[in-house]
Image (spheres, rainbow, N blue to C red):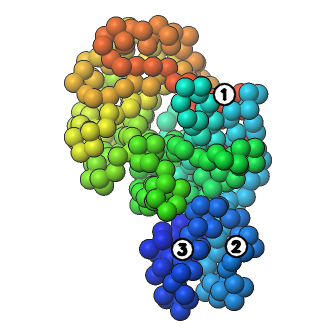
């Protein structure tokens, strides 16, 4: 297990205190400093004695957060993208999106990365083009949320992260164990207490892991990167479709719905001339007519390495889906001007 205590549950901290012959009540103190107060390091933990800190350090334990290398803010101030450096020098990007509503509570959503790079190779995605480096640890995933909480509190001391979407760099279900542990950690009532229904896990369609997630008994939203309604087209846009074709994917999604009673969100990046035609709409109707789902249409966010073009027909396409009695909307765009939108994260200093 990673020795960064940011990845430790209260149960694991209790066990650690016992192993190191430290008072059991110190576990709760540590947990509060890390999971509630997002301490940057030992020096901020005012009620933790130096002797205890030194003993944990000598045993190889730390409590570090990723380092913010650069920070970009959108013109409207509602989106913040951070380029982060991990302890081994790998870089990732994390995005904070602030939603302010007059008729409901404020929402502060963090889009977290689960891997440095990505191995899925979707040709229109900047992350996939960068290639796969490694999985992130629980502490590195939770640490992104901790940093965003600190940024929020700089201007809004009473606000905190309310929603988390595993839609940043990487394929979350390929780093399954760490992602699941991080979800349970941020959901814990003694910590951040982010509700399961306010957490979304995205996947390009790793069927066995979708089935594993269904068996976890968690009420998280499953978002599937669909992007096409036929195997021929989807294999071009989402290479993993060659291993897990649509029939298998839809069957796994049905299992997930049956286990959780949570609608599936299908993400559909709209690319001109690729998947934005009348026939594509009809194919979606055929594919999803019996599925409990909604469709999140995302006009392509252009990246430098790909020749694909952003569709001009998003509103027409969504209206056609609605006319076909499919629940479809255009995703609200945030962070496009700072390369923080869907498919644009690179983690290589390109902020």
For the residues labelled 3 and 1, the Cα–Cα distance comes to 41 Å
Tell me the quadrant of the picture where the C terminus can be found: top right
Q: Residue at x 71, y 44 (%)?
A: 156
Residue 308 image-quadrant placement: top right
Numbered disc total = 3
Q: Residue at x 59, y 25 (%)?
A: 102
- Secondary structure under the numbered disc 1 in the rendered image: helix
Q: Residue at x 53, y 92 (%)?
A: 21
**Percent position of residue 327, x then y:** 36, 19
Q: Is residue 59 placed above or below 12 in the rendered structure?
A: below
For the residues labelled 2 and 1, the Cα–Cα distance comes to 38 Å
Is residue 69 shown to the viewer in this render?
yes
**Percent position of residue 185, x then y:** 47, 60
Residue occupied by mark 1: 336
Q: Nearer the viewer, residue 177 or 14?
A: 14
Q: Nearer the viewer, residue 167 or 52?
A: 52
Could you tell whether 126 is left or right of 284 in the image? right
Q: Marks 2 and 1: which is nearer the front?
A: 2
How many neighbours does mark 2 have within 10 angstroms: few (below 14), some (14-19), or many (20 or more)? some
Looking at marks 2 and 3 on the same chain, the residue that comes earlier in the sequence is marked by: 3
How many neighbours does mark 1 have within 10 angstroms: few (below 14), some (14-19), or many (20 or more)? some
Tell me the number on the disc at residue 28: 3
Looking at marks 3 and 1 on the same chain, the residue that comes earlier in the sequence is marked by: 3
Residue at the bottom extreme? 21
């Amino acid at each position: 297990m990673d020795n960064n205590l940011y990845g430790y549950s209260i149960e694991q901290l209790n066990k650690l205190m016992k192993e190191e012959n430290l008072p059991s009540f110190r576990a709760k103190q540590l947990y509060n400093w890390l999971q509630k107060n997002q301490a940057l390091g030992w020096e901020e933990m005012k009620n933790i004695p130096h002797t205890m800190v030194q003993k944990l350090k000598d045993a190889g334990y730390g409590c570090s957060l990723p380092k913010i290398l650069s920070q970009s803010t959108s013109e409207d101030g509602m989106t913040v993208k951070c380029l982060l450096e991990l302890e081994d020098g790998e870089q990732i990007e994390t995005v904070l999106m602030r939603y302010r509503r007059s008729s409901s509570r404020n929402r502060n959503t963090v889009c977290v990365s689960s891997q440095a790079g990505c191995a899925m190779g979707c040709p229109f995605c900047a992350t996939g083009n960068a290639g796969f480096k490694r999985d992130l640890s629980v502490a590195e995933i939770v640490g992104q949320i901790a940093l965003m909480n600190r940024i929020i509190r700089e201007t809004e001391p009473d606000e905190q992260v309310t929603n988390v979407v595993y839609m940043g760099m990487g394929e979350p279900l390929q780093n399954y164990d760490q992602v699941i542990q991080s979800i349970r950690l941020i959901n814990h009532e003694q910590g951040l207490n982010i509700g399961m229904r306010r957490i979304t896990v995205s996947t390009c369609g790793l069927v066995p892991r979708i089935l594993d997630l269904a068996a976890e008994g968690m009420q998280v939203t499953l978002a599937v990167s669909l992007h096409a309604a036929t195997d021929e087209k989807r294999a071009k846009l989402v290479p993993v479709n060659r291993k897990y074709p649509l029939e298998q994917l839809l069957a796994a999604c049905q299992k997930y719905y049956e286990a959780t009673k949570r609608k599936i969100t299908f993400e559909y990046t709209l690319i001109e001339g690729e998947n934005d035609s009348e026939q594509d709409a009809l194919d979606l109707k055929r594919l999803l007519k019996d599925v409990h789902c909604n469709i999140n249409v995302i006009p392509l966010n252009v990246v430098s390495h790909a020749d694909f073009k952003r569709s001009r027909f998003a509103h027409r396409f969504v209206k056609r889906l609605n006319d076909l009695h499919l629940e479809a909307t255009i995703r609200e765009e945030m962070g496009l001007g700072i390369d923080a939108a869907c498919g644009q994260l690179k983690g290589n200093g390109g902020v």
